[in-house]
């Protein structure tokens, strides 16, 4: 777990620094200086371009993670893999551009009255789609070279710094909204450029084509992996971004802005999981290639325990402090209280599921992963259609929580039946019981008048109430060893 631990810690640091800046951007500043419609526009553009971008990658992210071990040969330019990757991405962008121009009149007609800002700035989808496609491809290539943390640094941290700069320029009157939205679009391309520069520095930006490895049988396998990867990846992106489009459809751009802002707090739970899953996916693919199922089992068990502990404490900190969170936001955002609860639950389920999706994707059962993703999409879309008209944006939160619970259960059962891996023990149930006990005991602390003081006191209490029984039960031993290792290195340097 050495590579996983190092990359996860580095990635988590970048993610949480980025989350801190994101909190300042999304929760403290943007609601004060932008209208809810303007906030909704930024999120809707990114959401739609992300869906297009996933389709435009044509399944090559999955091919990169699953098939690159067969291309890996630095002396031979990795058998022309990067050239192949970029060529397919270019084809995907041309297809998406054609789809955009076909769908553009319909999108404008649908939004011209209730979301006129989106109709005005719809042209920005083209550069955002281009950026989205090539970020997915270049980042996956960089990740398979075991440098996952840099991708997180530029996407989670640096991008939010750039966004903060754009917000400040708007706040001080240097930018008008048009300038801001152009700057916001361009900033999304910076991570792609920087990853390319790092690859060049490491002599891994190898564009020389080579077709020697593309034997008919191997090419057929690549096409198969890409096809199922396209459906799976596209489905995953639809799941993560479709709710914003549906809210805009059933409500309006202002509701999308409110939902997107409070949604941010729930996503904090996922941050440490992202870095672990990114690097674990690469190692799981290598392990399956070597028929090392034991290694996959170890990664699955350790990842599940660690992510359940981290996810639970983050859920407690968010929902336990929901009153203080809503004090920070303008009054219009109070209708997002239960969105925070249900999105946090949805992301907690994803943390507990840990690397189960990656195990299915990189096993011989990768085709079945597509079926599981389709079940998830049907669940999310149908529940949103039922609940959004009745209870508004809270319905979107409930739809996500229920759908991800179903998704988690299906993946767990599939892996247990088909591969024989089962990560759960009695300690996992106890972790959840300790978390529930910590939450209900924290309610005994009366609300303090100043929300900042209340947030600090309640957070400290929740951490102590949750961590103490975990510590005495011995569930934090791996964290203790990591801390001791870190302190030992500091002593050595001194």
Image: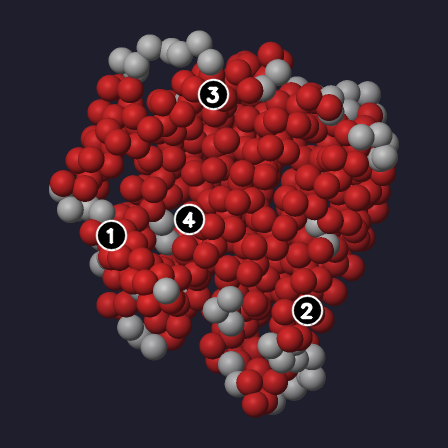
Q: Which residue is under mark 1?
A: 480
Q: Visible in this render: residue 258? A: yes
Give the image location of residue 257, x and y in percent. Answer: 66, 26
Q: Confirm or deny contact between disc 2 and disc 3 (CB under 8 A).
A: no
Residue at the spot 64% in from the left edge and 64% down from the top edge: 195
Choose between 168 and 315: the one closer to the eye: 168
Give the image location of residue 334, x and y in percent. Answer: 55, 14
Q: Earlier in the sequence, mark 4 or mark 1?
A: 4
Residue at the spot 55% in from the left edge and 20% down from the top edge: 328
Gap between marks 4 and 1 measured at Cα = 19 Å
Residue at the spot 49% in from the left edge and 37% down from the top edge: 267
Task: Please tell me whether mark 4 sits on a helix, a strand or a loop.
Answer: helix
Q: Earlier in the sequence, mark 2 or mark 3?
A: 2
Q: Is residue 411 left or right of residue 80?
A: left
Gap between marks 2 and 4 measured at Cα = 26 Å
Q: Which residue is under mark 2?
A: 197
Q: Earlier in the sequence, mark 1 or mark 3?
A: 3
Give the image location of residue 394, x and y in percent. Answer: 51, 20
């Amino acid at each position: 777990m050495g590579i996983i631990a190092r990359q996860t810690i580095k990635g988590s640091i970048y993610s949480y620094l980025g989350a801190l800046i994101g909190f300042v951007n999304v929760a403290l500043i943007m609601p004060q200086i932008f209208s809810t419609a303007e906030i909704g526009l930024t999120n809707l553009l990114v959401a739609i371009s992300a869906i297009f971008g996933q389709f435009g990658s044509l399944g090559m992210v999955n091919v990169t993670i699953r098939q690159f071990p067969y291309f890996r040969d630095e002396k031979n330019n990795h058998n022309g893999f990067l050239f192949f990757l970029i060529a397919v991405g270019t084809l995907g962008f041309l297809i998406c551009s054609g789809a955009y121009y076909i769908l553009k009149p319909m999108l404008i007609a649908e939004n011209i009255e209730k979301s006129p800002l989106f109709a005005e700035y719809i042209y920005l989808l083209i550069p955002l789609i281009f950026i989205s496609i090539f970020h997915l491809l270049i980042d996956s290539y960089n990740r398979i070279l075991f440098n996952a943390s840099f991708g997180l640094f530029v996407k989670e941290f640096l991008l939010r710094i750039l966004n903060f700069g754009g917000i400040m320029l708007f706040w001080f009157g240097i930018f008008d909204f048009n300038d801001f939205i152009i700057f916001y679009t361009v900033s999304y391309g910076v991570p792609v450029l920087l990853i390319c520069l790092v690859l060049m520095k490491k002599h891994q930006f190898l564009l020389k084509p080579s077709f020697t490895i593309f034997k008919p049988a191997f090419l057929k396998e690549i096409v198969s992996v890409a096809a199922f990867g396209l459906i799976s990846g596209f489905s995953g992106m639809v799941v993560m971004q479709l709710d914003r489009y549906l809210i805009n459809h059933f409500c309006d751009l202002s509701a999308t802005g409110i939902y997107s802002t409070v949604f941010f707090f729930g996503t904090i739970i996922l941050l440490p999981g992202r870095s672990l899953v990114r690097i674990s996916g690469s190692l799981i693919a290598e392990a399956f290639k070597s028929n090392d199922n034991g290694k996959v089992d170890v990664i699955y068990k350790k990842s599940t325990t660690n992510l359940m502990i981290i996810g639970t404490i983050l859920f407690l900190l968010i929902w336990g402090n929901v009153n203080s969170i809503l004090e920070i936001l303008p009054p219009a955002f109070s209708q997002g209280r239960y969105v925070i609860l249900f999105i946090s639950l949805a992301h907690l389920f994803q943390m507990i599921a840990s690397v189960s999706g990656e195990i299915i994707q990189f096993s011989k059962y990768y085709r079945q992963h597509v079926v599981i993703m389709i079940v998830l999409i049907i669940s999310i879309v149908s529940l949103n259609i039922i609940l959004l008209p009745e209870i508004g944006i809270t319905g979107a939160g409930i739809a996500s929580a229920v759908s991800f619970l179903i998704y988690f259960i299906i993946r767990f059962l599939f892996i247990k039946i088909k591969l024989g891996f089962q990560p759960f023990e009695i300690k996992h149930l106890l972790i959840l019981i300790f978390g529930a006990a910590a939450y209900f005991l924290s309610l005994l602390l009366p609300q303090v008048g100043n929300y900042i003081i209340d947030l600090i006191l309640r957070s400290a209490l929740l951490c102590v109430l949750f961590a103490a029984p975990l510590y005495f039960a011995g569930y934090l031993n791996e964290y203790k060893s990591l801390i001791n290792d870190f302190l030992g290195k500091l002593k050595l340097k001194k």
